[in-house]
Image (spheres, helix red, strand yellow):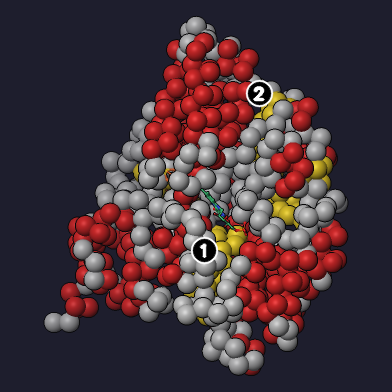
């Protein structure tokens, strides 16, 4: 069971019911649950959309798109049914926040899904969890059943005459299925191969109907936005970056854990104060700020506010909120190799630049780390990764290329230190060295 | 005979499938969950499982295999009764996942992706399982164990052996019990 942490700087909004038994429906109601959806039932769909827009809530799945804006793209009239799709595929290395939401506050996801449905005129919501999250799926399924039993879901929710159904779904292991159109394919019983865009899901999505797809944390935040009011929520964060978010601190940090901090919280402070600094008294070498696909930052680059815009300006991305801390005893080449190994494994193989590119990068880095690299390989790795950028069918290709480019550019010396048969300078005695087959 | 009586699935699973299929606008949407639930019961996707799922959904076996082969949790061969999946992705690697994976291999006396001769344990390296802040983490079937160290490995294995009713000469390590206690506190 994941350990819960806390820090005085936290602003607990989404996590405020964590550890309080709120998976139980009575407890959830006691803690103010299902009040927001009741409020929304008395309002117009436009009011809900505008409220979410005004809150400056941006998608927590990675790209940080304005949630209210996304909802407003759904056509009001549609011959086909509309759907809400909750993305609980959580597979980006470094990310484990949806895990806690499903565990401690599943009703917040349900309530948010209903509100999204009311906002866009959808009558069905799907909550898709990655296959590995079976114990969480059981918690969510129990919560859904309890909500049905209370009449919060079904043909006549809260006695309002409005219908809303929720269906839960399990995946079966695939990172790529987290990509929105691949998720829809998977939910339709197919391989998780992404679809060509446009049309975008808001217009043609699941079963061909207009679909809102949001990350589980985004959806779980919505009831809080409604409860707090858009302006108050927006104010917690920075301009255009409303509210708080769950940051997953991991790696060589003294106090790893999931902390809820205001958008724009300083990264350096997050590492040294909230996370207690670098573990084992070591020094900081690098930080991956938003999940494994985001470009690495050097220690001198971390005095930045953690919101989508500021991290973007620093040349990386806020991504999925996974802050991975790397100490000075770590080999960056090995880290880069393990990162690309993941993308090579998860590439769906549909398009050549990604399928072949990740494979070649993995092969080159494996050889390199084993001490058989040549000076020209360093440029080749960078060249290859740069040529994948923007040339793949879905963003997984970029997700593999971007971190690789940053590792080579920012830690070139470490690559050079592996040249001409030299053993890895960070080889530890008795510890196996990573050589991906 | 009705198709249901021919089922290679338990009546409970067959009923679950019937309910599942009615959830969606399109029957086929039940495919991925059905494959996983069938695997949970049968142990792997045998030819019989594939054939029956294809029949229930009105798909060809080839179509079912084509989908099944995409997903990493689905397997076409049996695994051990307890399938140990060690995450070695970045956050776990930084906190000693490979040392942990090595210790499992030593304790079980099997290599990567091996199965013990008694069929009790299989071992594999997996990608991120969504427990990064509690690294290094593993899953044994669907159960998570987190914040591990190699010294906890023997105790974990002993507990699963005990659960399976297999006598063991190794007493469950104190470290593992302490960890379980701590976990309960946070539950
Ligand atoms: C390869 C890939 C994997 C992704 N995995 C996830 C995921 O696991 N969870 C998630 O919420 N979004 C994931 N996304 C982002 C989704 O495509 C989508 O943008 C997101 O769910 C939208 O929700 P949001 O607007 O609330 O962030 C992934 C994207 C890509 C390209
Ligand atoms: S970029 Fe990679 S994951 Fe995306 S479609 Fe191409 S091969 Fe598949
Ligand atoms: S990296 Fe191991 S659980 Fe995420």
Residue at 36% over, 32% down: B111
Ligand 2's image quarter is top left
Residue A125 to residue A321: above or below: below
Quadrant in the picture for residue B115: top left
Calculate the distance from the C-alpha at mark 1 to the C-alpha at mark 2.
37 Å
Quarter of the image for the N terminus of chain B: give it.
Answer: bottom left
User: How many discs mark residues in the rendered view?
Assistant: 2
Who comes first in sequence, dot 1 or dot 2? 1
Which type of secondary structure does the marked residue at label 2 adopt?
A: helix
Residue at 33% over, 61% down: B35
Quadrant in the picture for residue A242: bottom right
State the residue position of label 2.
Answer: A410
Q: Position of residue A97 (x, y in %)?
A: 64, 54
- Crowd tier of the residue under label 2, counting other residues whose Cα lies within 10 Å: few below 14, some 14–19, many 20 or above: some
A217 or B81, which is in the foreground?
Answer: A217
Q: Position of residue A426 (x, y in %)?
A: 59, 17
A382 or A344, which is in the foreground?
Answer: A382
Q: Position of residue A277 (x, y in %)?
A: 78, 34
State the residue position of label 1.
Answer: A201
Q: Is residue A229 left or right of residue A33?
A: right
- The chain carrying label 1 is A
């Amino acid at each position: 069971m994941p350990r819960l942490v806390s820090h005085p700087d936290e602003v607990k909004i989404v996590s405020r019911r964590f550890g309080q038994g709120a998976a139980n429906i009575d407890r959830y109601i006691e803690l103010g649950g299902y009040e927001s959806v009741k409020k929304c039932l008395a309002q117009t769909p436009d009011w809900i959309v505008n409220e979410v827009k005004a809150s400056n809530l941006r998608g927590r799945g990675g790209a940080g798109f304005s949630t209210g804006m996304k909802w407003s793209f759904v056509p009001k009239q549609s011959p086909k049914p509309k759907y809400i799709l909750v993305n609980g595929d959580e597979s980006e290395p470094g990310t484990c926040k949806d895990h806690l939401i499903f565990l401690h506050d599943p009703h917040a996801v349900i309530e948010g899904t209903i509100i999204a449905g009311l906002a866009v005129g959808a009558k069905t919501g799907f909550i898709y969890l990655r296959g590995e999250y079976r114990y969480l799926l059981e918690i969510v399924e129990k919560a859904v059943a309890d909500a049905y039993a209370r009449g919060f879901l079904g043909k006549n929710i809260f006695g309002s005459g409005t219908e809303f159904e929720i269906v839960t779904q399990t995946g079966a292991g695939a990172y790529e299925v987290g990509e929105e159109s691949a998720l829809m394919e998977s939910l339709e019983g197919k391989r998780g191969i992404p679809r060509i865009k446009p049309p975008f899901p808001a217009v043609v999505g699941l079963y061909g109907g207009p679909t809102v797809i949001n990350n589980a944390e985004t959806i779980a935040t919505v009831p809080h936005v409604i409860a707090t009011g858009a302006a108050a929520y927006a104010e917690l964060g920075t301009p255009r970056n409303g509210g708080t978010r769950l940051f997953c601190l991991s790696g060589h940090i003294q106090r790893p854990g999931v902390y809820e901090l205001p958008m724009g919280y300083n990264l350096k402070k997050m590492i040294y104060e909230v996370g207690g600094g670098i573990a084992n008294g070591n020094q900081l070498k690098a930080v991956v700020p938003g999940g494994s696909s985001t470009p690495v930052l050097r220690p001198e680059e971390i005095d930045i506010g953690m919101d989508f815009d500021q991290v973007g300006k620093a040349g990386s991305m806020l991504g999925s909120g996974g802050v991975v801390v790397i100490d000075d005893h770590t080999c960056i080449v090995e880290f880069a190799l393990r990162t690309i190994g993941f993308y090579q494994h998860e590439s769906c193989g549909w398009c050549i630049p990604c399928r072949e590119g990740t494979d070649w990068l993995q092969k080159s880095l494996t050889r390199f780390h084993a001490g058989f690299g040549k000076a020209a390989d360093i440029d080749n790795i960078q060249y290859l990764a740069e040529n994948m950028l923007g040339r793949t069918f879905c963003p997984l290709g970029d997700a593999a290329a971007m971190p690789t480019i940053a590792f080579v550019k920012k830690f070139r010396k470490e690559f050079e230190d592996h040249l001409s048969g030299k053993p890895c300078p960070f080889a530890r005695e008795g510890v196996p060295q990573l050589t991906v087959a | 005979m009705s198709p249901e009586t021919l089922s290679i699935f338990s009546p409970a699973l067959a009923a679950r499938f019937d309910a599942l299929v009615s959830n969606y606008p399109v029957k086929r949407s039940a495919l991925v969950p059905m494959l996983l639930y069938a695997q949970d019961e049968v142990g792997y996707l045998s030819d019989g499982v594939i054939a029956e799922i294809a029949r229930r959904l009105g798909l060809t076996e080839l179509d079912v295999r084509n989908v099944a082969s995409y997903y990493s949790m689905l397997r076409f061969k049996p695994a051990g009764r307890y399938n140990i999946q060690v995450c070695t992705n970045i956050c776990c690697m930084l906190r000693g996942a490979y040392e942990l994976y090595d210790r499992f291999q030593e304790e079980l006396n099997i290599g990567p992706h091996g199965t013990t001769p008694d069929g009790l344990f299989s071992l594999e390296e997996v990608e991120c399982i969504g427990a990064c802040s509690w690294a290094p983490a593993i899953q044994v079937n669907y159960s998570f164990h987190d914040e591990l160290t190699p010294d906890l490995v023997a105790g974990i294995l002993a507990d699963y052996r005990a659960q399976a009713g297999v006598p063991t000469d190794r007493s469950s390590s104190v470290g593992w019990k302490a960890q379980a206690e701590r976990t309960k506190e946070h539950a």
